[in-house]
Image (spheres, helix red, strand yellow):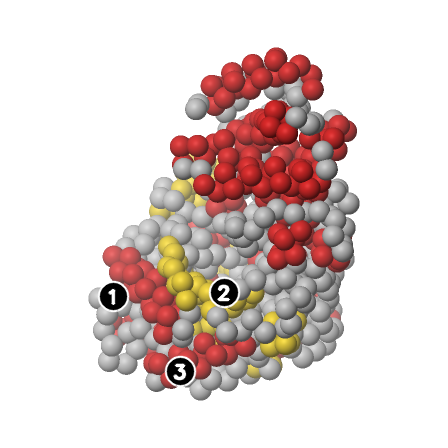
Amino acid sequence: MANQSYDAIVVGSGISGGWAAKELTEKGMKVLLLERGPNVEHVKDYKNATKAPWEIPHRGRRTIEMLENHPNLRRDYVLNELNLDWWAHEDDSPYIEKKPFTWFRGYQVGGRSLLWGRQSYRWADIDFEANAKQGIAVDWPIRYKDLAPWYSYVEKFAGISGNRDGLDILPDGEFMPAIPLNCVEKDVADRLKNHFGGSRVMTNARVANITQPLPGRPGCQYRNKCSLGCPFGGYFSTQSSTLPAAEATGNLTLRPWSIVTRVLYDKDSKKATGVEVLDGETNETYEFDAKVVFLCASAFNSTAVLMRSATDIWPEGLGSSSGELGHNVMDHHFRLGANGTIEGYEDKYYFGRRPGGFYVPRYRNVGDESRDYVRGFGYQGGASRQGWSRTVAELDFGAPLKAELTEPGAWTIGMTAFGEILPYHDNTIKLSKTEKDKWGMYVLEMDAAIRDNEKKMRVDMMNDAAEMLEAAGVKDVSTYDRGYTFGQGIHEMGTARMGRDPKTSVLNGNNQVWDAKNVFVTDGAAMASAAAQNPSLTYMAMTARAANFAVEELKKGNL
Amino acid sequence: MTVMNRREALKSVVLMMGGTMVGANVILTGCAPDKQIEGLDFSEEELAYMDEIGEAIIPTTDTPGAKAAGIGSFMAMMVKDTYTEEQQKSFINGLNSLKSSFKSETGKEFMDASVEERTAFLNQLNKAAMNQNSADEDEAKYILMIKDLTLLGYFTSEIGATQALRFVETPGRYDPCMEYKKGDKAWAI
């Protein structure tokens, strides 16, 4: 039987894959979008999105059964009885932790676009130039100006709300009106401005929550239940945004339960001819042909596909000729900062539940400053009034306690730092030679750790937060460091980096695999450094840019 | 006290008090550290007892109290589903100890006392728990558990969220800075 043929195959339906499918179908290509897990239909499958608190059995607490069944998810806030189906089943899809590694995966249509934090920040020149200037890893083959028009392009379609702040460190974009800072945050931001003379800035979080309607998307209703799926299309996800656009072209075939085992590679043409798929439900194997293949399976799974491909030519897989495939694992290290209480706003409150708070862009090692580490970090945070769960140990049970807790408590404010992790060659993932998953595929083995640079950075990350809060008049400031294990940032990056030289990088400046130019990798795997900003917006821009390039090259007959 | 010691202690209490003890149906089953008590369940009588404990912490005032919000059943579910074996034992042990100490100190059965009397007694326990040094922490744990489950169960119940607090399912807008007057209710979520 002849293989089914498409113009393009996109592997993975999350943020990057959704964008690849949209761009390629809109440019007239027949696209097969492969997703390893089940389908999730927009609105219809958001089964817990509109439940009231009392309809949630354990009211957000974790059951012993959940803890036992999710040894990985339980390591952070993500373990939640309301969206458990949207995280990879840990028994079916294990991985090996040579060093502690927390891997949060979304194996369904939409991937983690359903679950993401939605913070959307452009990178700046300083981020793309850092590797070259500091002689770390390899130079990015692109600069901010290469990506800037694509940032604009994806921001307009995805819908990013934010404030235009005119900062070099955090370039402005095509924003919808920002979600406002509340009274406390606004005053704290003003006090920081006065205290630091503009060298440290607190601004509105820039989030992929829309404050104005977009086609098919009424917009954010301030329910702050994003991770349950939004029936209002309030935030960008594959389902709310890129998938309907791709489907509207009539050029899309979506195939759930399609685990890509490998890219099919033809050594004579030095190109991919398609992919091999293992059906996740039937265990049958299929082959699909295409002129181009986009790997958007999330950083480590895209790299794993490469590692399983063309092994007759390169034992370590397609792209391994560089010696960099599977290397330079990155993430953002965090889980530390400071918080405190602030007085003088007892007559102020707010209405609605925001999906984002404030952001403090990087300020360390900018300009002439030189700390005892390189790169930097940013903060996310927010202020709010305490609710009924606050500690009121001194109050008597009975009517006094009830009366007190029916009113809002003190204003508190807190901030968490997100820091850059350098690309270390020795931070690696590789395929196990012994352990397999439910489908008989060799699982990944993680071997990554933060080093001195990150550890030194963490000192500033914690202390600066306290310094800023105190400077803004916040009382009872306390710092915290809940510890970080690799992967917890859920910003995994690297392992198939872009570069200028096929000897030291897996991808070129257009996200093409050097060794197979019709194979593109446009998710976190492509990153040559991590910056401190949340990375998804950059994946969107990179994907749209690469898809445009791929179609142009196809037209020119170059692929 | 080790787990087994507490088990032994519990066993003797259960034997002494007979079948009227909370958890008596399962407390003699085998030891499984870091697991849950198998087959733990609560009788109607026990649920009613827990309802009254919750009501003593969050009573009916101008809005309904914890009993109306079904706090006994809620506590039972949470203890069954979210507590480890050790926590379950502390909780059950605590309910039994409350029952007997209430009787011995007030001369009344807990269930026969007034809400005010129950509240007053629980307040003593709560104050004592707050002042406990860490060596005695274990004995105090159950009152904090009861308080925690009562507050959680009440303020996330339909009654608590919509009558004691203000609940707006779909705000539809965000007002970053509105006036607040003392006495205005807090948002439920």
Q: Position of residue A427 (x, y in %)?
A: 33, 52
In the rendered structure, which disc, 2 or 3, sits on the residue that comes first in sequence? 3
Tally the marks. Answer: 3
Is residue A437 found left or right of A228 in the rendered image? left
**Cα distance, mark 3 to mark 1?**
25 Å
Q: Badge 2 is on which residue? A: A412
Is residue A554 found left or right of A282 in the rendered image? left
Q: Position of residue B84 (x, y in %)?
A: 55, 32
Q: Is residue A356 visible?
A: yes
Q: Position of residue A92 (x, y in %)?
A: 56, 39
1 and 2 marks in contact (CB < 8 Å): no
Q: Is residue A207 visible?
A: no
Q: Amino acid at mark 1?
A: Tyr
Q: Nearer the viewer, residue A286 or B7?
A: B7
- Tell me which residue sits at (63%, 53%) in the image: A400
2 and 3 marks in contact (CB < 8 Å): no
Above-or-below relation of A409 to A283: below
SS of the residue at dot 1? loop
Q: Badge 1 is on which residue? A: A373
Local crowd size for mark 2, using a 10 Å CA cut-off: few (<14), some (14–19), many (≥20): many
Local crowd size for mark 1, using a 10 Å CA cut-off: few (<14), some (14–19), many (≥20): some
**Cα distance, mark 2 to mark 3?**
20 Å
SS of the residue at dot 3? helix
Q: Nearer the viewer, mark 1 or mark 2?
A: 2
In the rendered structure, which disc, 3 or 1, sits on the residue that comes first in sequence? 3
Same chain, labels 1 and 2 = yes
